[in-house]
Image (spheres, grey):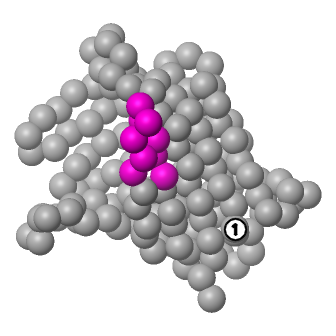
Amino acid sequence: MSERMNVSIRLESRQDGAVQVSEHRGELFRKDRSIYIRYEESIEGEAKAEPIRSLIRYRQGELLITRRGAVDSEQLFAVGGRRAGRYRSPFTSFPMETETKRLAFHAEDAAAGESAEPPFTIEWNYDLWIEEHLSGQFHIRLHIQGEQ
């Protein structure tokens, strides 16, 4: 794979039967044994709002999502135990924890495993805890497709 490549990103989030889908254009690159996906998202209905710059780092057994801008957050996903995170916006701020039940990498070229070039999908299920209360159960699918 080239050092950096432009990609299309489809993020599907399911919680309590509700599905949210967002699509973005971004950049994929690899460093050490990790895959990085970087993209920007705007806040719907807020033309003047600062965009949110998202960086996803995936390596075998671990996924880290960092968001900066109008929202500042960090979530770590790894099966086995709870992982600390945080969320901050102009309106609220709180610590949170994720308890990951499943984290999987699916590639069209299954023989290449996690070093595969796009298209591939990263999928995870987790419980979100805020102040020791279960806030929600999520199933996320992140599909990455190379752009020509």
Q: Which residue lies furthest to the top in this view?
A: 132
Position of 3 compared to 135: left or right?
right
Position of 84 compared to 122: left or right?
left
Rendered image quadrant of residue 54: bottom left
x, y percent for residue 1: 74, 74
Q: Is residue 14 magenta?
A: yes
Between 3 and 49, the residue placed more toward the observer is 49
Q: How many labels does the image show?
A: 1
x, y percent for residue 14: 46, 41
Residue drawn at (48%, 56%), measured in percent from left and top? Answer: 11
Position of 129 compared to 119: left or right?
left
Residue drawn at (71%, 48%), measured in percent from left and top? Answer: 105
x, y percent for residue 46: 12, 65
Q: Which residue lies furthest to the right in this view?
A: 111
**Image: magenta residue range:** 12-20
Residue drawn at (50%, 22%), measured in percent from left and top? Answer: 99
- In this rendering, does residue 138 appear at all? yes
**Main SS, magenta residues:** strand
Q: At numbered mark 1, what does the secondary structure look like: helix, strand or loop?
A: loop
**Amino acid, disc 1:** Pro
Q: Does the magenta stretch include residue 36?
A: no
Label 1: which residue? Answer: 119
Crowdedness near tag 1: few (<14), some (14–19) or many (≥20) residues, C-alpha within 10 Å: some
Tell me if residue 9 comes above or below residue 134 in the rendering.
below
Residue drawn at (60%, 25%), measured in percent from left and top? Answer: 101
- In this rendering, does residue 31 appear at all? no
x, y percent for residue 77: 53, 34
Image quarter in which the C terminus is found? bottom right
Q: Which residue lies furthest to the bottom in this view?
A: 148
Between 128 and 57, the residue placed more toward the observer is 128
